[in-house]
């Protein structure tokens, strides 16, 4: 039985075996994506479990599959990475299939999803698809940020904020790193990431910012301020704080397992 509760038939099992051990074929690029679209459409019609899913019920699976893909990447097993990327891709197709069924004018298909990201990539790579010249990767990132800022201005009708669109539902460590990255690209002073728990007055010209207070008038705790500063330190060292903490967590896990094994032997 598969992870989502389906009982694969002989043909599906054979397909799964072939996917696990791919062979060279003369299939056109993208043929597998079309096949997946047909499979997803049929499951939505004929499988009771698939038929009752919504965007909301699928949301935890999207997050879970993403974490499993990261786990596979960190494990360095190419077969595992391919399998987990397939699970992530399934979530994209599943959400698009659910959306395609809406009749209130808000629906879209997986083709619309693909068209949207393709258009975005073309728009944000004028050095590839237009006549813009760049000196290297750093200038590519600079152009990307400028184009993204222009898109935000067009969407909001005003200048907006460089922090617009940052998802606050993500893990706090990753959130802190993303906020700092965005702010740094906008030229925000580094000391804005330093909290002393004491509110600083906001001057008439906006200099200085609200200091140690959040939007609800609360100052971060000493521990929260230290954690936020550690994120800044990691970024200064060129490290991803989320990945560094995950590595430490893995090392701790190994220590605990070794301790358990030693305790059983004694």
Image: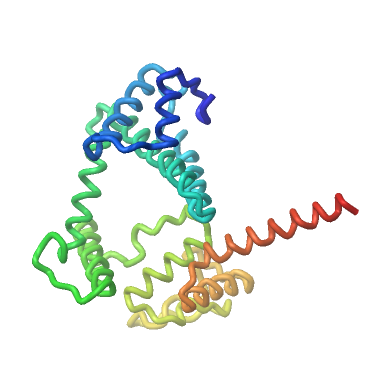
In the image, what residue occupies the spot 19% across and 62% down? 125
| Residue 16 quadrant | top left
Q: Position of residue 216 (x, y in %)?
A: 50, 63
In-image side of 155 versus 44 (left or right):
left
Quadrant for the C terminus in the image: bottom right
Q: Nearer the viewer, residue 184 or 219?
A: 184
Residue 39 higher or lower than 180, as above or below: above
Residue 172 higher or lower than 87, as above or below: below
Q: Position of residue 209 (x, y in %)?
A: 42, 77
Q: Position of residue 45 (x, y in %)?
A: 35, 19
Q: How is the image coloured?
A: rainbow
Q: Position of residue 9 (x, y in %)?
A: 45, 18
| Residue 159 quadrant | bottom left
Q: Nearer the viewer, residue 159 or 87?
A: 87
In the image, what residue occupies the spot 47% across and 21% down? 8
In the image, what residue occupies the spot 25% across and 38% down? 30
Outermost residue to the front: 24
Outermost residue to the right: 266
In the image, what residue occupies the spot 54% across and 77% down? 195
**Is residue 258 in view?**
yes
Outermost residue to the left: 131
In-image side of 138 versus 171 (left or right):
left
């Amino acid at each position: 039985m598969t992870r989502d509760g389906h009982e694969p038939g002989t043909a599906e099992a054979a397909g799964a075996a072939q996917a696990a051990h791919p062979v060279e074929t003369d299939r056109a690029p993208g043929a597998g994506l079309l096949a997946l679209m047909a499979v997803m459409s049929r499951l939505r019609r004929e499988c009771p479990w698939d038929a009752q899913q919504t965007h909301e019920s699928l949301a935890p699976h999207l997050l879970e599959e993403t974490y499993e893909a990261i786990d596979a990447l960190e494990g360095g097993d190419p077969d595992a990475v391919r399998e987990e990327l397939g699970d992530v891709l399934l979530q994209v197709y599943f959400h698009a299939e659910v959306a395609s069924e809406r009749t209130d004018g808000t629906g879209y298909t997986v083709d619309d999803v693909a068209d949207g990201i393709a258009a975005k990539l073309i728009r944000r790579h004028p050095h590839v698809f237009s006549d813009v010249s760049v000196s290297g990767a750093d200038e590519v990132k600079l152009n990307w940020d400028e184009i993204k800022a222009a898109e935000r201005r067009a969407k909001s009708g005003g200048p907006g904020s460089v922090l617009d669109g940052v998802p606050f539902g993500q893990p706090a460590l990753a959130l802190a790193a993303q906020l700092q990255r965005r702010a740094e690209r906008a030229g925000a002073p580094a000391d804005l990431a330093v909290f002393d728990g004491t509110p600083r007055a906001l001057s008439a010209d906006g200099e200085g910012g609200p200091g140690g207070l959040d939007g609800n008038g609360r100052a971060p705790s000493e521990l929260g301020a230290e954690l936020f500063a550690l994120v800044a330190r990691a970024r200064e060292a060129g490290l991803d704080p989320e990945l560094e903490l995950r590595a430490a967590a893995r090392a701790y896990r190994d220590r605990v397992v070794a301790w358990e094994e030693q305790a059983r032997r004694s």
